[in-house]
Amino acid sequence: MRHATLLVAILAFVPLASATAQEPPPVKVGDRVRVTAPDLGRRVGTVQLLTTDSLVMRLEYSIWPVAIPLASATRLEVSRGQKSRMGLGASIGVSGGVLLGYLISSGSCSGESFLVPSREACIVVSTVGGAFVGTFLGVVVGTMASTDKWRAVPLVRVAPQQDGRFGFGASVRF
């Protein structure tokens, strides 16, 4: 009976071990990462080399790689793609376009003209035109101003202790 209990316990953990073994490593060479450390601040760059105790990365706007000790890192995040700001740009653009179109037209539209029959129609046409131009410009700017989506990665450390044994530490945020 004792052997059967041991066998059931082992078989219960086999699916868990195989499921965790199939997960990709959280950080690999070539990933865009954001590291936060008290002495460095927050740094963004591309992973060049990853060892058990340090992370070598090429920072944004720099050609030289920098080694960051993982023991000093308080937070490590991996970029999971970029998020467009097109919607925000469009909403700011349409608001600004409507306001600017109205302000310009209310001061410059006079009575009747060849294109519009009245001053009110001139204001409406200018305001709608400003909304279209503002939306277009907002979409263009919002598309160019995309931001990264970050996912926090747990920091796991294995380090020698003073008595000759190894210690294991993990940092998980939620």
Image (cartoon, rainbow, N blue to C red):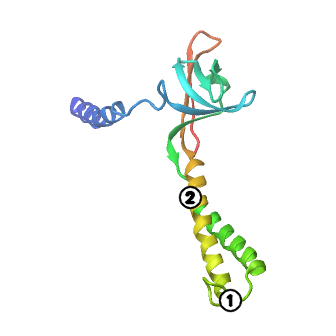
Mark 2 secondary-structure assignment: helix
CB contact under 8 Å: marks 2 and 1? no
Q: Earlier in the sequence, mark 2 or mark 1?
A: 1
Task: Between residue 41 and residue 132, name the one nearer to us.
Answer: 132
Residue 166 sits above or below residue 75 on the image: above
Residue for point 53% across, 51% down: 84
Residue 117, by quadrant, is: bottom right
Disc 1 residue type? Glu
Quadrant of the frame with the N terminus: top left
- Answer with left or right where residue 4 lies relative to residue 159: left
- Distance between the Cα atoms at labels 2 and 1? 34 Å
Which residue corresponds to mark 2? 139
Residue for point 30% across, 32% down: 18
Residue 25, by quadrant, is: top left
Task: Between residue 103 and residue 54, name the one nearer to us.
Answer: 103
Disc 2 residue type? Val
Residue for point 52% across, 38% down: 79
Residue 166, x across and y down, in percent: 55, 16
| Count of numbered circles in the view | 2
Q: Residues within 10 Å of mark 1 (few under 14, many from 20)?
A: few
Which residue corresponds to mark 1? 112
Residue 16, x across and y down, in percent: 33, 36
Residue 42, by quadrant, is: top right
Q: Residue furthest top?
A: 164
